Amino acid sequence: MLKVWENYALKLTPFTPSKFHSTIKINYHLHRIRKLGKQLINDFNQVSNTLLALGECYAGLYSAATNFNKTTEAGKNLHLEDIYLTMNNIMVAWGKPCKFYRE
């Protein structure tokens, strides 16, 4: 009985895919990595553009608040200028590193 089992075990070989099959899988994954990498660069550029646009909005609000405080004595709010300036700086600081430049 033992002899029969040893002969059977020797005949079993694990499945090994052909080189052609493996190459197709590798090429598929490499293609997908390249495609997703390009998509990631586009996404980061879009995030960067959005953050920089938000920075421009805060710069506009800062200018409006500064003009308002210069033209009126009543109702001045100096803290808004500080908030808008800080938010502008934050958006620009976050937006620039996200930008990918293709050379």
Image (cartoon, rainbow, N blue to C red):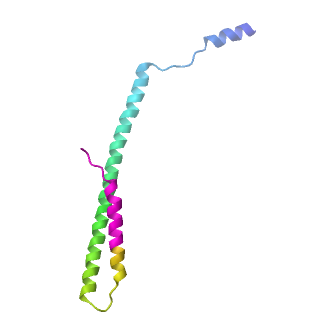
The N terminus: image quadrant: top right
x and y percentages locating residue 62 in the rendered image: 29, 75
x and y percentages locating residue 97 in the rendered image: 34, 55
Residue in the image at 33% along x and 67% along y: 89
Secondary structure that dominates the magenta span: helix
Residue in the image at 26% along x and 84% along y: 68
x and y percentages locating residue 25 in the rendered image: 42, 28
Residue 97 on the magenta span: yes
x and y percentages locating residue 24 in the rendered image: 39, 26
The C terminus: image quadrant: top left
Residue furthest right in the image: 1
Residue furthest bottom in the image: 74
Residue 99 on the magenta span: yes
User: Relative to residue 81, is residue 15 depicted above or below?
Assistant: above
Residue in the image at 27% along x and 67% along y: 56
Find the magenta span and give its range. Answer: 85-103
Residue in the image at 34% along x and 51% along y: 43
User: Relative to residue 86, is residue 71 depicted above or below?
Assistant: below
Quadrant of residue 34 within the rendered picture: top left
Quadrant of residue 14 within the rendered picture: top right
Quadrant of residue 77 within the rendered picture: bottom left
